[in-house]
Image (cartoon, rainbow, N blue to C red):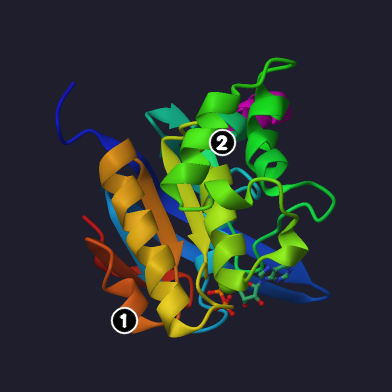
Amino acid sequence: MSLHFPIIRFKDVYKYYYTGDEKVTALSGVSLEFQKGDFVSIMGPSGGGKTTFLNCLGGLDFPDQGEIYLNDRLLNNLSDKELTELRRKEIGFVFQFFNLMPTLTVQENVELPLLISRSARTESKQVQSLLNYVGLLHRAKSFPAELSGGEMQRVAIARALVHRPSIVLADEPTGNLDSENGIKILELMSKACTDFKTTVVMATHNSQIADYGNRHFEIRDGKATGRAY
Ligand SMILES: Nc1ncnc2c1ncn2[C@@H]1O[C@H](COP(=O)(O)OP(=O)(O)OP(=O)(O)O)[C@@H](O)[C@H]1O
Ligand SMILES: [Mg+2]
């Protein structure tokens, strides 16, 4: 396998939304590719298409035209079942509002992707080691409401990495954090890129945050420009 194997490829992708009589072109001919281990920053104005891009890549939404490949697999042709399977195995998600389950402990939240993807058996060592990795092993038995925002997002990162996905998608992961905690999260995601050879694709409004990436591009009016290759 070539070292420059593109893990993500978009070929002329279009996505439209219809609201009443209006047709919104959320992605307008996006073509780009990223390599394994890239830390990709997406910037651009509100409504530009960043979340749409991430949702199409994560199999949460579907393009109307064009092709999206993840690990050389064309996503367009997958059935719902195959897409769900792919999301569970290959993709980790980190959201702006953390999205932890309030009734589960920190440990259980991180365990969840393993429980879902591997029927019964959970690998508690893997969970413990990820909690240790994000510096929260001592909070394993706490509930999300007992944590700070920065800590909750570190739990979300552990959860996103626990099943060893090939890509992590992060939509404004620091949007609800102060700058100190935001930087901690970025350092952690950047370290995960190296340590786990994970490809991270992150949308952000903040150019200082975007600087953590090694690939940068902008989505404006559904069109991608910048150093995406
Ligand atoms: N479910 C939807 N139905 C209709 N229009 C939508 C839907 N989702 C997004 N859009 C529209 O698609 C365009 C792109 O939206 P998107 O959410 O991708 O932007 P964004 O770059 O993530 O913005 P923000 O920085 O505010 O999060 C916008 O014009 C938005 O109004
Ligand atoms: Mg968005």
> Which of pointers 1 and 2 indicates the residue nearer the eye?
1
36 up-or-down from 55: above or below: above
Tell me which residue sits at (65%, 48%) in the image: 60
Residue 161 drawn at (x, y percent): 49, 41
Residue 188 drawn at (x, y percent): 38, 57
Q: Which residue type does callout 1 highlight? A: Gln
Quarter of the image for residue 99 reads bottom right
Q: Few, some or many C-alpha atoms within 10 Å of disc 2 (few <14, some 14-19, many ≥20)?
A: some
163 up-or-down from 141: above or below: above
Q: Residue under label 1, please give it.
A: 208
Tell me which residue sits at (64%, 62%) in the image: 98
In this rendering, position of residue 124 left or right of residue 37: right
In this rendering, position of residue 101 left or right of residue 163: right
Q: How many marks?
A: 2
Q: Earlier in the sequence, mark 1 or mark 2?
A: 2
Q: Is mark 2 within 8 Å of ligand 1?
A: no
49 up-or-down from 83: above or below: below
Tell me which residue sits at (33%, 73%) in the image: 210
Tell me the tag on residue 115: none
Tell me the tag on residue 76: 2
Q: Which residues are magenta?
A: 75-86
